[in-house]
Amino acid sequence: MRNVCEIGLETDKSIKMWEEFFPNARIFGIDIDEKCRELGGNRRRIFIGNQSDTVFLNRCIAEIGCNIDIVIDDGSHIPAHQIKTFNTLFPVLSSHGIYVIEDTGGCVGDFDLVTLNYFKEIANSIMYWPKGLDPANWSFLAKFPKEATWLDRNVGGVAFYRWLIFIMRGRNPEDNPYLRSALPVDHVRPNADGSMPDWMMDGTSDPTVPGR
């Protein structure tokens, strides 16, 4: 664990807790209140700014560097802010980083469940399957075709709890523990159109720009 970032501090209780819980990590705090600047020290670094400001968030990223391991968004609790912050910070998480959004739904006035419904859509990326690929080829699928989105390739899971959402980064389909090259005795099946998938058993993924 190297970099942990919490959005929304108010006091030093949580940020000191993370410092104690992750003894080898740098702890970063983001808050809109200038008074929170004094909460820094030791391995704690504080940024003062608005989480809905992508220019500010990108400055934080530039100083923290990529490969943030954990983000905890306990900031404004405004759905638009939660979504914008996620879209800015999630792409710079480490390959198996964890993104947490605290306080969603009715407890913060999001009666239409805007944040929840946005992240429910990500389940489609977790379950992405290349069009026309025979399910029997699942253990040979080493990379996705170009049609796959960045989220298809980089979201490993989403967990919903009451008022709380976890989004986990992953490497799809490379994280499949049963991934292997086909042997002569294996019966690799053609695509639905009769063609053979030329992006199987390769072991690399096509680079894409983060986004849906």
Image (spheres, grey):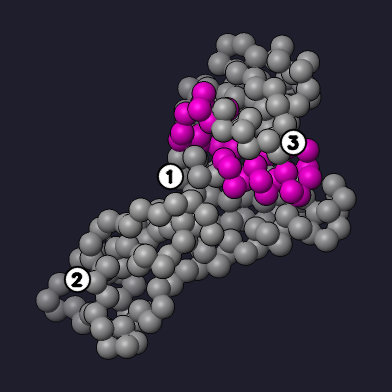
Q: Quadrant of residue 31?
A: top right
Which amino acid is tagged 1? Ser
Q: Residue at x 35, y 67 (%)?
A: 145
Q: CA distance from mark 2 to mark 3?
A: 48 Å
Q: Residue at x 27, y 75 (%)?
A: 197
Dot 3 falls on a residue whose secondary structure is: loop
Instruction: Judge whether residue 76 is colored magenta.
Output: yes
- The relative height of residue 169 versus residue 3 in the rendered view (above or below) is below
Which amino acid is tagged 2? Ala
Q: Position of residue 150 (x, y in %)?
A: 46, 56
- The region drawn magenta spans 60-89
**Label located before the other in sequence (1 or 3):** 3
Q: Which mark is residue 75?
A: 3
Q: Which residue is mark 2?
A: 182
Dot 2 falls on a residue whose secondary structure is: loop
Q: Which residue is mark 1?
A: 95
